[in-house]
Image (tube, helix red, strand yellow):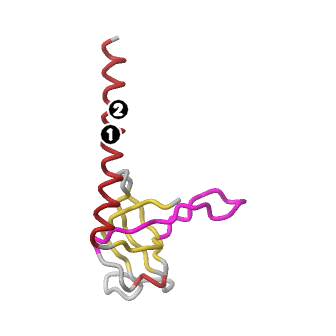
Amino acid sequence: MFHPAKVTGIFRPKDKEVISSDDSTQALVEMWDENIFTCVVEPKIAAKLKTGDTVLVDYRPISEKVPSPRQVVSKIIYKKKASHLWEQYTEYRRQKKQEVSRSQQKQYMG
């Protein structure tokens, strides 16, 4: 499973405002469902990543024994594909919020 996100910040090991213990890059991302995470970026794409990029975050389990998600930025999506991906997920989120709102209104009204 992969989740789309927008990059809102990047932390590279050689940045002037970063002191790093390793060579990894992290990205601050806002997920499609409005959660915010700081994720490791795959080394092969770290140099190409920019603030504002639409990315896919790998949410597959770490292993069969460790069911926690990897939460690693693994792909950068551009142009029409990025717009289409983001629009589909945000529309899904909007519809779910409307359903919850309607359900809460019905419960309130008795």
**Helix, strand or loop: magenta stretch:** loop
User: Residue at left 29%, top 55%?
Assistant: 87
Other-residue count near label 2 (Cα within 10 Å), few / some / many at <14 / 14–19 / ≥20: few
Q: Amino acid at mark 1?
A: Gln
* Left or right of residue 35, residue 59 in this image: right
Q: Position of residue 74 (x, y in %)?
A: 47, 73
Query: Would residue 69 be counted in the magenta stretch?
Result: yes
**Cα distance between the residues tagged 2 and 1:** 6 Å
Quadrant of the image for the C terminus? top left
Position of residue 23 relative to residue 98, above or below, is below
Q: Nearer the viewer, residue 67 or 98?
A: 98
Q: Residue furthest top?
A: 110
Verify CB contact (< 8 Å) between mark 2 and mark 1: yes
Query: Where are the magenta residues, as a range?
Result: 51-72
Query: Would residue 55 be counted in the magenta stretch?
Result: yes
SS assignment at label 1: helix
User: Residue at left 40%, top 61%?
Assistant: 4
Q: Amino acid at mark 2?
A: Glu
Q: Which residue is mark 2?
A: 99
To which quarter of the image does residue 84 belong? bottom left
SS assignment at label 2: helix
Q: Position of residue 3 (x, y in %)?
A: 44, 59
Q: Which residue is mark 1?
A: 95
Q: Position of residue 96 (x, y in %)?
A: 36, 39
